Image (cartoon, rainbow, N blue to C red):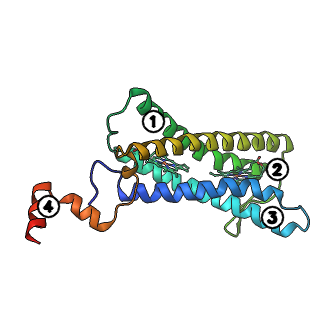
């Protein structure tokens, strides 16, 4: 059973799935542009994978946000006000950037004149080729990527600091082993009696 002092299993699973996909997507987005333009195949395949994964991330983040808006997160352990505000602000920036980035990428791809292919399906063209708009959206896509990298760096550094302080913040977002979960649900007095009996 999920305990109110931790994120639920759904939230934890979505956090780590989205975190892994976003880190891979950021690296892939930079790397794919180093692929030579000729022959066209490998570069196009790499771009299409980036587009498909990006839209998958958007779907997962929307599910995550839906969860977040219908569940109260566990209350933070005691910490200075600026830290609690910083946590809330950085989480909000992460959600906003993770929604804006795929939408900007999608619109930029639509304006590029190349058909957008998602997991093998070619989508109907959304607009005619528009080079000036494409350039603006590419700039925005790179800028939001920079915001994402900076915010994730702060987020991970904060998580590491909490891990070193052993203040329980990491445990809130860490999958718990079945045995540990069962032990945590036994009230302490009964747990010590059980130890004596065994
Ligand atoms: C090594 C990498 C990471 C660690 C150790 C980590 C750790 C954590 C922890 C401990 C929390 C819970 C904070 C709390 O108790 O309030 C959290 C929340 C969160 N993390 Fe991460 N995280 C990592 C990577 C990422 C990445 C890459 C993203 C974004 C792509 C991300 C997005 C978020 C968001 C949006 C929340 C807020 C959850 C909510 O309240 O809805 N995290 N993370
Ligand atoms: C959370 C999702 C996404 C992340 C984190 C992400 C990240 C990135 C990064 C880091 C780059 C390299 C930027 C640069 O070097 O200037 C890039 C490039 C690119 N991304 Fe994404 N991206 C995401 C979603 C998408 C989506 C959904 C599409 C299209 C449907 C897309 C299309 C592109 C294209 C076409 C490029 C090449 C540069 C350009 O033409 O603008 N991205 N992306």
The answer to whether the residues at label 2 and label 4 have Cβ atoms under 8 Å apart is: no
Q: Residues within 10 Å of mark 3 (few under 14, many from 20)?
A: some
User: What numbered label is drawn on residue 44?
Assistant: 3
Does residue 103 lie above or below 184 as drawn? Answer: above
What residue does disc 4 label?
A: 191
The residue lying furthest to the bottom in this view is 198
Farthest residue to the right: give it.
38
Give the CA distance from mark 2 to mark 3. 20 Å
Within the image, what quadrant is residue 192 found in?
Answer: bottom left
- What is the quadrant of the N terminus in the image? bottom left
CB under 8 Å between discs 2 and 3: no
- Distance between the Cα atoms at labels 3 and 1? 38 Å
Quadrant for the C terminus, please: bottom left
Cα distance in 3D space between marks 4 and 3: 59 Å
Label 2 vs label 1, nearer the camera: 1
Can you identify the residue that label 1 sits on? 88
**Nearer to us: label 4 or label 3:** 4
- The earlier-in-sequence mark between 2 and 3 is 3
Q: Residue at image x 10%, y 56%?
A: 189
The residue closer to the viewer here, 38 or 104, is 38
Q: Quadrant of residue 197?
A: bottom left
Q: Residues within 10 Å of mark 1 (few under 14, many from 20)?
A: few
Q: Secondary structure at mark 3?
A: helix
| Mark 2 → mark 4, Cα distance in angstroms | 68 Å
**Dot 2: within a 10 Å radius of its alpha carbon, few (fewer than 14), some, or many (20 or more) residues?**
few
Query: Measured from the top left, where is residue 25 in percent x and y?
Result: 65, 56
């Amino acid at each position: 059973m999920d305990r109110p002092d931790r994120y639920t299993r759904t939230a934890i699973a979505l956090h780590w799935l989205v975190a892994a996909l976003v880190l891979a997507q950021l690296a892939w987005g930079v790397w794919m542009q180093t692929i030579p333009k000729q022959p066209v195949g490998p570069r196009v395949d790499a771009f299409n994978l980036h587009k498909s994964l990006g839209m998958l991330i958007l779907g997962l983040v929307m599910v995550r946000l839906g969860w977040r808006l219908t569940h109260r997160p566990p209350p933070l352990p005691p910490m200075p006000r600026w830290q609690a505000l910083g946590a809330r602000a950085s989480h909000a920036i992460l959600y906003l950037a993770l929604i804006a980035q795929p939408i900007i990428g999608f619109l930029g791809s639509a304006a590029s004149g190349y058909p957008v292919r998602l997991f093998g399906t070619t989508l109907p063209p959304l607009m005619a080729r528009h080079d000036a708009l494409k350039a603006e959206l590419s700039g925005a896509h790179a800028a939001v990527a920079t915001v994402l990298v900076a915010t994730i760096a702060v987020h991970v550094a904060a998580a590491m600091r909490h891990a070193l302080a052993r203040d329980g913040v990491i445990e809130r977002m860490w999958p718990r082993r079945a045995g540990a979960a069962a032990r945590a649900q036994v009230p302490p007095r009964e747990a010590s009696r059980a130890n004596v009996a065994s």
